[in-house]
Image: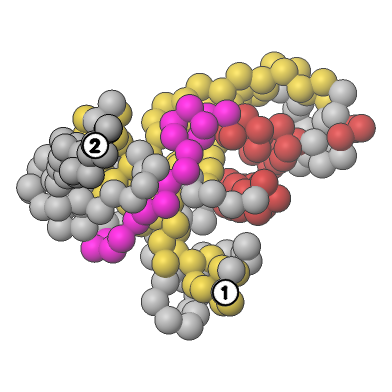
Amino acid sequence: MTQENTSTPNFDFKLIAVKCKNCDSGLVVEVNDNITYCMSCGSGFEIVDGELIPIEINFAAATMRGNGEPIYKPFWLLKTTVTIHERNASGNFFKNLFGSNNPTGSGSVIFYIPAFYCSLDNMKVLAQEFTMKNPVASPQKFNTKLVGFAYGKEDAKKLAEFILISMEAEKSDMMKTFNYNIDFHSLEILGIPFYKISENRYKDAILGIEI
């Protein structure tokens, strides 16, 4: 005769509070977030192998009014130098950047890459429009929640290259040659304000783009 063991298993779980390394305040960390922001002192941290590594986090002020309070969504802000070695494409982005029709040259580009999950089409529109217009001149520190990070640094670099190519290839059959190099100087986080306009639709409060 066997006896069924109905006792409760002894699992050794520990819940560890994540605290800011600078002010000791509690940090809000959602599932799968690898970035966290301290609303008390404005410090930002990247979570790498359980360790908090400092990272710069700022916010853009809303320039458009909407219903309710804005919700801030995270973007990677990548400050780069882009060098074009050879180019035969239909896009006008680098013509505007270099100020001439010279197909080669180099210049500073600040890429805005959504760090939150959205569809590829929405990501392309947001990244292209914000990168081309660079509308945030003076980022600030806000006492607000910033969560929902889906993409890390290496993802952001790959997406920046994807956006660079997509901005040049307005028509894929017109892009014959495009040899380039991107030097990444710094990666920061920027919170962009959005207003909720329906159940699953949002509109950013800087350029008015709906996603």
Determine crowd level at label 1: few under 14, some 14-19, many 20+ residues with C-alpha closer than 10 A: few
Image location of residue 193, percent across then percent down: 44, 64
Overall secondary structure of the magenta section: loop
Q: Nearer the viewer, residue 174 or 29?
A: 29
Determine crowd level at label 2: few under 14, some 14-19, many 20+ residues with C-alpha closer than 10 A: few
Q: Quadrant of the C terminus?
A: bottom right
Q: Which amino acid does label 1 sit on?
A: Glu
Q: Is residue 51 magenta?
A: no
Left or right: residue 44 compared with residue 173: left
Q: What element carries label 2?
A: loop
The residue furthest front is 1
The residue furthest left is 24
Residue tagged 1: 199
Left or right: residue 71 compared with residue 103: left
Q: What residue type is labelled 2?
A: Gln
Image location of residue 43, percent across then percent down: 21, 46
User: Is residue 110 visible to the viewer in this orientation of the structure?
Assistant: no
Q: Residue placed at 30% from the left, 60% from the top?
A: 145
Q: Residue placed at 44% from the left, 57% from the top?
A: 73
Highlighted magenta segment, given as a residue range: 142-158
